[in-house]
Image (cartoon, rainbow, N blue to C red):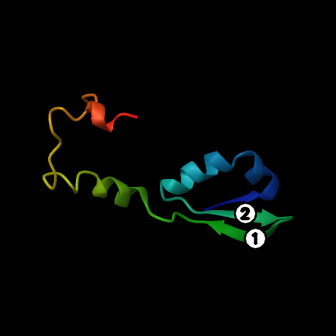
Amino acid sequence: METVNIHYCKRNLSRLLSRVELGEEIIISNRGVPMAKLVPFHTSSNRQASLGLDRGHFIVLEDFNAPLPVYFQL
């Protein structure tokens, strides 16, 4: 578990969030005093396991991307 200061967190928040998304926990400190902990809301393994759960529950028609009929167009 890494500890970073607030200034580093402000400059690198997107990088830190990418690491947290992968399951890492990061402590944010102010002048060496821990103030907050970044933890994943949902782990990436749960996200991967949820892909494809709706397969077979609905059908996509062949003309899905075809233009709409004239009476639907504005």
Q: Where is residue 2 in the image (x, y as percent from the top left)?
A: 65, 59
17 sits to left or right of 41: right
Q: In the picture shown, does residue 47 fall above or below 63?
A: below
Q: Where is residue 36 in the image (x, y as percent from the top left)?
A: 70, 70
Q: Are marks 1 and 2 in contact (CB under 8 Å)?
A: yes
65 sits to left or right of 1: left
Classify residue 34 by image quadrant. Answer: bottom right
Q: How crowded is mark 1: few (under 14 residues within 10 Å), some or many (20 or more)?
A: few
Q: Position of residue 33 (x, y in %)?
A: 81, 71
Label disc, if present, on residue 63 of the rendered structure: none
Q: What residue type is labelled 2?
A: Ile
Q: What residue type is labelled 1?
A: Pro
The residue sitting at the right extreme is 31
Q: In the picture shown, does residue 5 fall above or below 73?
A: below
Q: Name which residue lies at 22% across and 35% down.
A: 64
Question: Is residue 52 or residue 29 the one in the foreground?
Answer: 52
Question: Is residue 64 or residue 52 the one in the foreground?
Answer: 64
Dot 1: element = strand
Q: Name which residue lies at 82% across and 52% down.
A: 7
Q: Position of residue 35 (x, y in %)?
A: 76, 71
Dot 2: element = strand
Q: Mark 2 points at which residue?
A: 28
N-terminal label among 1 and 2: 2
Question: Is residue 67 or residue 34 the one in the foreground?
Answer: 67
Question: Is residue 65 or residue 20 the one in the foreground?
Answer: 65
The residue sitting at the front extreme is 71
Q: Name which residue lies at 41% across and 56% down.
A: 44
Q: Distance between the residues labelled 1 and 2?
A: 6 Å
Q: Mark 1 points at which residue?
A: 34
